Image (tube, rainbow, N blue to C red):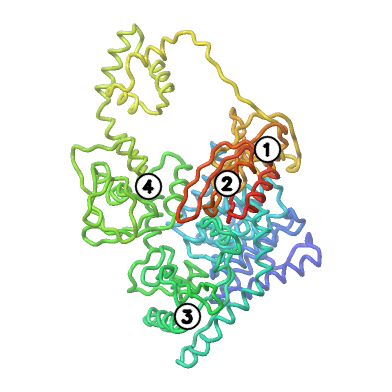
């Protein structure tokens, strides 16, 4: 293969392509022997020629993208020759005439295997699950070659960096999918820098108002906060030097998404948050001295400043499941401001930045399994287990393997890692499905506990079982993990199979009494009415009397019934989505559409909203930053319709507010007078609770648009008793 760039590129483009390739080589941190360089160079020229007639939406040569992905893989993740080669070639099979056989003949089986994992499925029976099918294909490679996932994360990061060139509905689809799946995956693989950037870029497109607001406030306080932290460091630097300690300190800026998440969780304004900028202390020392040296740093800081002991977090003694290690602490500065600090070794910091690749670089042969090894085992269990659908697989993966974890113990002292909010019954099913199926209660820390009790880190749990117990439908309410739910579902199915013979006899008897044929067609009608998908459930319901003669009479011998209902619709404009046009992504359309407003986020006119268009159903309208909407956009990207409200002025929408105020006499009168008499708004509900001279109030009010709601928030905030007003999602 000739190592030249084709003439389809201009001389300026050739120059720029070679410049970017040079930056890739500079970013390559692992060994670069001659054979490694030759393989990467071969892949570079092959990809440049294969993509020579392709352009990105910006008009730039397509080859810029593979080079950028390879640079991220080399610099930000620390991958080597094979991965860089695959990153350069990752779109060749999908977007050009070359096949996997061509890749294998030129670059070998290992490269071809990774490229196959990165190539999207082109034929999926159910279009709605196409995103899930492709995600499952990528995740399944975790058990064989994790490099597929790492390169995919690099690919996703560059796509997010260049997302501004895409049409709005695709921006929402890709950004939501990124925040729901790819950012948590980067976190689980320990790639914190990539995770933070993916989340920030996702927020930029799902909620640009919030993103721009936080960015503006960060710019306004950066100089002042940095000066405060430098003043905090001055006496510490002197103390470290006096004690002969070589400690590096960094001032670190929290990510935009992380700030927004904290503001939301703690119901605080930007001004009320501390830790927006924090300090990271690094020590370079042998691995066996890390704990001692890190705690020495903490001890020195306590000699100068007072710690907030309740905020101390020790991720060194018990690292997170993704390998993260650090001490987190909060100290009171001389100026009366809280300062957040992180203390870690150089090795811990590299694992925080480069995740999986750094973890394996530092791993020793005699090292015990870490939380990361345990997580990979759980991934492999999920991949090998049977699942009803690909969407179920994605739900299980995101719910069980992306959530924060707790660590509990068996009676024998064996540690078991579970997702946060797991219950006694989740624990039982994690031990064995038979233990879960026959559970009746538990001893948690030697105290009797119900199956639905939530567990905390450090709990010791002993499950109490009985052979007379059997799995029950109501247990689904007790479970938090999708893994346990799948085991319960299988247990219920197995238990109900034992009722088939009794159920069949009952069905034949009842149908004979009604002078009807016990045919499959009649059985199907009853199953449809009862919303049952399997014969196992049908015969169980019959055996237990939950489907009886009156049910069969109603379904199979219906009386005339002239009932009916109606829906009320309003008008709004639509910005075209994938399901509306294929030729022009920017086509606009408007008109009357049937739709439902989601009660999970209560969107109102003026909000950034998104609609979902499913065949035969009214459009579903959500706020674009609604967690449920983000989950749906990540799963049903082809059903997204970017909505723009144009409501009729006489229609009002429900909005919720949370108010914190001083418990003064007359507060309620002031609030209701403002609502009813001044702003002429209809109150739907108001709940107030007084605690220690403070009032927490939640009110629901009907407004016509976001401007009315903003005015209400502003006017409530100006009442002298009111300290904070926050809109509820």
Pinpoint residue 282: horizontal percent, then vertical percent: 49, 80
Q: Quadrant of the N terminus?
A: bottom right
Does 70 sit left or right of 459 as displayed?
right
Pinpoint residue 139: horizontal percent, then vertical percent: 48, 53
> Alpha-carbon distance for marks 3 and 2?
39 Å
* In this rendering, the label closer to the viewer, 2 or 4: 2
> Alpha-carbon distance for marks 1 and 2?
17 Å
Residue at horizontal 68%, vertical 68%?
Answer: 219
* In this rendering, the label closer to the viewer, 4 or 1: 1
Quarter of the view holding residue 65: bottom right
* Residue 305 image label: 3
Residues marked 3 and 2 touching at CB (< 8 Å): no
Q: Disc 4 marks which residue? A: 483
* Residue 269 image label: none
Which one is earlier in the sequence, the residue at label 3 or at label 2? 3
Q: Nearer the viewer, residue 326 or 382?
A: 326
Q: What SS does tag 2 mark?
A: strand
Q: What SS does tag 1 mark?
A: loop
Residues marked 3 and 4 touching at CB (< 8 Å): no
Q: Disc 1 marks which residue? A: 680
Residue 595 showing in the rendered view = yes
> Alpha-carbon distance for marks 3 and 1?
53 Å
Residue at horizontal 42%, vertical 70%?
Answer: 312
- Residue farthest toward the right in the current orientation of the protein: 11
Which one is earlier in the sequence, the residue at label 2 or at label 4? 4
Pinpoint residue 166: horizontal percent, then vertical percent: 71, 51
Q: Disc 2 marks which residue? A: 657
């Amino acid at each position: 293969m000739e190592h030249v760039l084709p003439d389809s590129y201009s001389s300026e483009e050739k120059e720029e392509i070679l410049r970017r390739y040079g930056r890739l080589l500079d970013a390559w941190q692992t060994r670069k022997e001659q054979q490694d360089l030759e393989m990467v160079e071969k892949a570079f020229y092959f990809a440049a020629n294969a993509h020579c007639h392709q352009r990105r939406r910006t008009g730039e040569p397509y080859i810029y993208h593979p080079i950028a992905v390879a640079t991220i893989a080399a610099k930000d993740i620390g991958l080597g020759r094979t991965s860089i080669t695959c990153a350069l070639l990752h779109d060749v099979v999908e977007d050009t005439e070359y096949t996997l056989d061509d890749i294998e003949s030129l670059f070998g089986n290992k490269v071809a295997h990774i490229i196959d994992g990165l190539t999207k499925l082109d034929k999926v029976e159910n279009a709605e699950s196409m995103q899930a099918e492709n995600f499952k294909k990528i995740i399944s490679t975790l058990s064989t070659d994790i490099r597929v996932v790492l390169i995919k994360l690099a690919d996703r990061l560059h796509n997010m960096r260049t997302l501004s060139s895409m049409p709005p509905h695709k921006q929402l689809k890709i950004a939501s999918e990124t925040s729901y799946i790819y950012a948590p995956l980067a976190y689980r693989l320990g790639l914190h820098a990539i995770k933070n950037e993916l989340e920030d870029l996702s927020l930029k497109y799902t909620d640009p108002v919030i993103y721009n607001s936080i960015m503006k406030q960060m710019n306004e306080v950066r100089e002042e906060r940095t000066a405060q932290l430098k003043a905090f460091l001055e006496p510490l630097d002197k103390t470290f030097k006096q004690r002969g300690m070589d400690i590096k300190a960094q001032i670190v800026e929290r990510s935009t998404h992380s700030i927004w998440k904290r503001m939301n969780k703690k119901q605080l304004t930007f001004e009320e948050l501390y830790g927006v900028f924090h300090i990271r202390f690094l020590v370079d020392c042998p691995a066996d001295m890390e704990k001692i040296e890190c705690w020495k740093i903490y001890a020195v800081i306590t000699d100068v400043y007072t710690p907030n002991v309740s905020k101390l977090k020790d991720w060194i003694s018990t690292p997170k499941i993704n390998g993260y290690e650090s001490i987190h602490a909060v100290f009171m500065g001389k100026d009366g401001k809280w300062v957040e600090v992180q203390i870690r070794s150089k090795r811990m910091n590299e694992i925080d930045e480069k995740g999986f690749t750094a973890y394996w670089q530092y791993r020793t042969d005699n090292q015990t399994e870490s939380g990361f090894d345990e997580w990979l085992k759980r991934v492999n269990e999920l991949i090998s287990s049977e699942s009803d659908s690909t969407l179920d697989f994605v739900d299980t993966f995101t719910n069980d393997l992306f959530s924060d974890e707790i660590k509990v113990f068996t009676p024998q002292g064996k540690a078991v890692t579970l997702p946060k909010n797991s219950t006694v019954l989740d624990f039982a099913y994690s031990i064995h499905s038979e233990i879960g199926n026959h559970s009746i209660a538990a001893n948690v820390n030697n105290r009797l506990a119900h199956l639905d009790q939530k567990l905390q880190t450090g709990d010791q749990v002993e499950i109490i079982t009985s052979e007379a117990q059997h799995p029950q439908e109501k247990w689904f309410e007790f479970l938090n993990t999708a893994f346990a739910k799948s085991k319960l579902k299988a247990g219920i199915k197995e238990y109900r199979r034992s009722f088939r013979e009794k159920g069949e006899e009952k069905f034949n008897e009842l149908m004979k009494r009604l002078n009807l044929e016990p045919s499959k067609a009649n059985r199907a009608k009853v199953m449809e009415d009862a919303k049952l998908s399997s014969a196992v459930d049908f015969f169980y319901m019959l055996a237990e009397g939950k489907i009886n003669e009156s049910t069969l009479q109603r379904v199979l011998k219906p009386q005339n019934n002239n009932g009916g209902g109606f829906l009320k619709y309003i008008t709004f404009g639509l910005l075209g989505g994938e399901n509306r046009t294929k030729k022009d992504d920017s086509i606009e359309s408007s008109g009357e559409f049937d739709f439902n407003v989601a009660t999970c986020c209560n969107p109102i006119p003026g909000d950034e909203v998104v609609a979902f268009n499913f065949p035969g159903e009214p459009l579903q309208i959500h706020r674009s930053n609604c967690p449920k909407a983000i989950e749906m956009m990540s799963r049903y990207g082809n059903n997204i319709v970017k909505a723009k409200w144009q409501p009729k002025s006489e229609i009002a929408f429900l909005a919720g507010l949370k108010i914190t105020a001083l418990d003064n006499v007359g507060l309620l009168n002031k609030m209701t007078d403002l609502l009813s008499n001044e702003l002429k708004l209809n109150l739907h509900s108001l709940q107030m609770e007084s605690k220690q001279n403070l009032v927490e109030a939640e009110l629901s009010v009907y407004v016509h648009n976001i401007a009315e709601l903003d005015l209400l928030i502003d006017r409530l905030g100006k009442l002298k008793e009111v300290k904070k007003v926050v809109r509820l999602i």
